[in-house]
Amino acid sequence: MEDINFAVANDTEKIIKDFYNSNCENYNLLIEQLRKTSQLCNIYDKILDHSADGLYITDAKANTLKVNKSYENITGFSREMLKNMNVADLIKKGYVNKSGALLVIENNNQPITFEQRINNGKLVLVTCNPMLGDDGKLLMIITNTRDVTELEELKNLSIKNKEFIEKDQIEIENLKKHLLEYPEIIACDKKLLDLLLAIDRLSETNTTVLLLGETGVGKDEFAKYIYRNSNRKHERFIAINCGAIPDNLVESELFGYEKGSFTSADSRGKIGLFEAANHGTVFLDEIADVPLNIQVKLLRALQEKQIVRIGSVNPIKIDVRIIAATNKNLWEMVKKGAFREDLYYRLNVLPINIPPLRNRIDDIIPLTEHFLTELNTKYSYNKKLSVDAKNVLLSYSWPGNIRELKNVIERAVLLNKNNLITASELSILPANDISPLYYNDQIDITEVLCRIEYDLLNKAYEKHNNVRDAAKSLGMALSTYVRKRKQYRKKYGA
């Protein structure tokens, strides 16, 4: 009767006894009762198979009586394989590591719950409950099996994530201590801290780095940070603004020339910046502005580690690390034929995208306080920002990024008549829209005019993204624009 539900079997035996006692008078009734019993058994089987948990039923000696479909799916054991098998055999064959049915028998018919490892790798939660007869003797053991493999995996993943977060937090705290050595880098926002962690890992390599980001995000400071953390930090660091060198002088500035190479050449010749930086680091700012005819020579310097001076045919070996930077989309320039594809791939080994200030909200106030401290020290002031001023700074989009923030703060400090700077005094507008201008006895009019001129130079550059068009828009000669911008940047900082 192992294929018949035990709850119905007792009723069937009673019917059979009644059948014989009535001398076969109730034969038709017996047949009808047996048919109903069979139907009930099928219904009970279907109910068991619809259970999401695996069910395993054994008799009092731990012999298999019945399993449902869920148990087959969870364990991978088929009903045919388990038929008439004692659970002790499952352990012997290595199908399971222990049996709940045997534990119930060994513990005087006490219920038990434990974790069981199946040979298919799954972890299951097993609950075994004994079923006792009216006389208190064990009739069968019903085992409920639930797959908890995914729960275990989630638990392990949670532990790993926690360990990762803790490790990441330790790295960030160490990074913050490290940044104390670099006051020009202000980083409190998680995005920038994560970026700096990545930069720290690659700084010690000699691989070419391409810094990408909008104008004013501080690409030059990141270049210096990479250099100061590299194994070349004791060698020279030469920064070259490719957009500030006139086209006819780019080649001679970068690679040098021999004496007598051209009419205005120095009679002694000239060493180029690449040669001067040998064993050190060259920072090529505004790399997108390098003329096409010079790009092939720049590619040779990167690829073959050698340069040739103008007027010479003898290559000179160089060993420099290249850090390049641009605020332009180089790939779009490649597609338009404005930038060499082979040079693009040579530069784009380790691209680093520096997020704009509007995406680094947590850095705005720390940067502001940093600039305020510098300016208060410089001018012997004690200026502070009001709460409403800070809210305005946090809500502004900062198209000019850190450079614009610094200009706004310095302008507010210079024009503020009290020690508390309010929102209305921030003047987050183009410099030529500032109205009215407030002065007091502490303001140097020459200093104010210089600041406004510097702001105009920067705004022109932010609009045109290159010094040539910026100079033209202001009606200035290129050399004058470059000279003044360099002078002001040296005085006020980038």
Image (tube, rainbow, N blue to C red):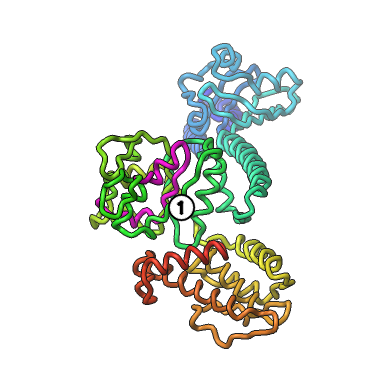
Q: Nearer the viewer, residue 275 or 124?
A: 275
Number of residue marks: 1
Query: Mark 1: which secondary structure?
Result: strand
Q: Nearer the viewer, residue 139 or 150?
A: 150
Q: Position of residue 260 (x, y in %)?
A: 27, 47
- Residue at horizontal 55 percent and vertical 47 percent from the top: 225
Q: Nearer the viewer, residue 121 or 287?
A: 287
Q: Looking at the picture, which amino acid does disc 1 mark? A: Asn
Residue 68 versus residue 264 in the image, above or below: above
Residue 310 versus residue 482 in the image, above or below: above
Q: Position of residue 176 (x, y in %)?
A: 66, 48
- Residue at horizontal 62 percent and vertical 62 percent from the top: 367
Relative horizontal placement of residue 486, taking residue 246 as reference (left or right): right
Rendering quarter of residue 409: bottom right
Rendering quarter of residue 463: bottom left
**Dot 1, how many residues are within 10 Å of its Cα: few (below 14), some (14-19), or many (20+)?**
some
Kindly tell me whether residue 326 is visible in this rendering.
yes
Residue 207 versus residue 476 in the image, above or below: above
Relative horizontal placement of residue 366, taking residue 349 as reference (left or right): right
Q: Outermost residue toward the bottom?
A: 436
* Residue 452 shown in magenta: no
Q: Which residues are magenta?
A: 269-293
Residue matched to label 1: 353
- Residue at horizontal 58 percent and vertical 63 percent from the top: 361
Q: Nearer the viewer, residue 211 or 471?
A: 471
- Residue at horizontal 36 percent and vertical 50 percent from the top: 253
* Residue 288 shown in magenta: yes
